[in-house]
Image (spheres, rainbow, N blue to C red):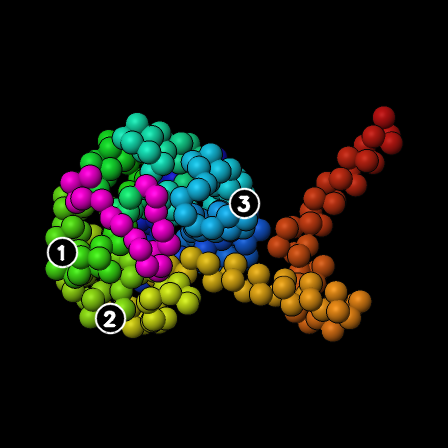
C-alpha cells in the first residue's frame, strides 16, 4: 500500500497549477500516465463500471468493485490517486467505511457527490440531487472518518444544471463549511461559470473536461486564467483505447490479418520498457542459474 502522506494530492497541487489529472482505468494505464510525467491520476466510477464490469455508469458497481482496482493501481504506481466514490454507497456508516477502506487501499483522495443514490452520469439528463443538508451530512461523516490528515475529501456538485449558478454557489459554501477540502464543479458550459465559483470559493476547484459532454474542451491555460486549480480528463485514454481496439478487431475479422493496423499498436519492445521486463527476466535467469548449481 502506498503512503498517502508521501503521495498526497495537495503536494502534487503545490508543484503544478492547474494540476492535470488523467483517468487511468487500470494499473498499466497508470504506468503510462506516470511515464508521461503526470503528477496525479484518477480512477473513474464510470471507468470501473465500463471497463472492469461492462456496465453503464448508473451506480451499479459497489465499494468492493472499486477497491479492487484501487489496490491494483496503488500497489504499482506511487502517484496520488483520486477516486470516484459516487454517493458513498449508502448511509453514514457506509460512507465512513468507504473512507477508511480507501485510505487503507492507498488512495490519496476521493470525491463524493450530491446526487441521489440512484445516480446518473453528470453529463446526462434526468439527474436528481439531494437536499443540501443531506450532502453536508455526507461530507461531515467522510471528514470524521478520515484517519490520515493528508487524505483529501472532495465534494462534487451536480447542482448547476438543476438549480442554477447562485444556488450551486450556496451549496459549495455549505460543503466547504462542512469540511470539504476541495470542490468538483460539474457541468459548466462557460468559463465565466468557473470564474464565478473560484472567485467565491477559498478551496481548490476542479474542472471536469470530459469528451462529448456538456462542458467544452477548455484548455489548461484557459482554465488557469479563471482560477481553476485542477483539470480532470477522466476517460480520454479509455475512449481512445476502445476506438483503437474496435478498429483492430474489425480489421482482423474482415481482412484475416492485422498487418494493416500494426502502426496503431504498441510494440513488444515499448511494452517491455514500461513494465521493466528485462529486469524481471534477468532475476529469473539468476534464480534458474542458482537452482542448477545446488
Closer to the camera in the image, 243 or 108: 243
Q: Residue at x 18, y 57 (%)?
A: 163
Crowd rating for badge 1 (residues with CA inside 10 Å; few <14, some 14–19, many 20+): some
Q: Residue furthest front?
A: 126
Asked which quadrant contains residue 209, the reply is bottom left
Closer to the camera in the image, 270 or 162: 162
What's the distance in space between the residues labelled 1 and 3, CA to CA? 36 Å
Question: Of helix, strand and loop, which one carries label 2?
Answer: helix
Closer to the camera in the image, 77 or 67: 67
Range of magenta residues: 117-134
Which callout, 1 or 2, points to the residue nearer the camera?
A: 1
Percent coordinates x, y for residue 208 in the rendering: 34, 60
Residue that label 2 marks: 191
Residue that label 1 marks: 167
Is there CB contact under 8 Å for labels 2 and 3?
no
Question: Of helix, strand and loop, which one carries label 1?
Answer: helix
Earlier residue among tags 1 and 2: 1
Earlier residue among tags 1 and 3: 3
Q: Residue at x 22, y 55 (%)?
A: 159
Earlier residue among tags 2 and 3: 3
Amino acid at each position: 500500500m502506498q503512503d498517502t502522506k508521501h503521495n498526497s494530492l495537495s503536494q502534487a497541487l503545490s508543484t503544478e497549477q492547474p494540476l492535470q489529472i488523467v483517468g487511468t482505468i487500470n494499473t498499466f494505464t497508470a504506468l503510462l500516465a506516470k511515464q508521461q510525467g503526470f503528477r496525479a491520476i484518477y480512477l473513474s466510477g464510470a471507468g470501473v463500471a465500463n471497463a472492469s464490469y461492462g456496465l453503464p455508469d448508473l451506480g451499479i458497481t459497489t465499494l468492493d468493485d472499486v477497491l479492487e482496482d484501487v489496490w491494483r493501481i496503488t500497489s504499482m504506481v506511487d502517484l496520488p490517486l483520486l477516486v470516484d466514490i459516487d454517493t458513498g454507497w449508502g448511509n453514514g456508516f457506509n460512507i465512513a467505511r468507504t473512507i477508511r477502506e480507501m485510505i487503507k487501499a492507498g488512495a490519496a483522495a476521493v470525491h463524493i457527490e450530491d446526487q441521489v443514490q440512484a445516480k446518473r452520469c453528470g453529463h446526462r439528463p434526468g439527474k436528481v440531487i439531494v437536499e443540501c443538508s443531506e450532502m453536508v451530512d455526507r461530507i461531515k461523516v467522510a471528514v470524521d472518518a478520515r484517519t490520515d490528515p493528508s487524505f483529501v475529501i472532495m465534494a462534487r456538485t451536480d447542482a448547476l444544471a438543476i438549480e442554477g449558478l447562485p444556488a450551486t454557489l450556496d451549496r459549495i459554501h455549505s460543503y466547504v463549511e462542512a469540511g470539504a477540502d476541495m470542490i468538483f464543479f460539474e457541468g459548466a458550459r462557460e468559463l465565466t461559470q468557473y470564474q464565478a465559483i473560484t472567485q467565491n470559493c477559498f478551496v481548490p476547484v476542479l474542472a471536469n473536461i470530459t469528451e462529448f459532454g456538456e462542458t467544452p474542451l477548455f484548455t489548461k491555460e484557459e482554465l488557469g486564467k479563471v482560477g481553476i486549480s485542477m483539470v480532470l480528463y477522466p476517460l480520454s485514454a479509455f475512449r481512445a483505447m476502445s476506438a483503437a481496439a474496435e478498429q483492430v478487431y474489425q480489421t482482423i475479422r474482415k481482412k484475416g490479418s492485422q498487418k494493416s493496423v500494426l502502426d496503431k499498436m504498441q510494440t513488444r519492445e515499448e511494452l517491455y520498457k514500461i513494465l521493466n521486463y528485462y529486469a524481471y527476466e534477468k532475476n529469473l535467469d539468476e534464480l534458474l542459474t542458482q537452482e542448477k548449481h545446488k
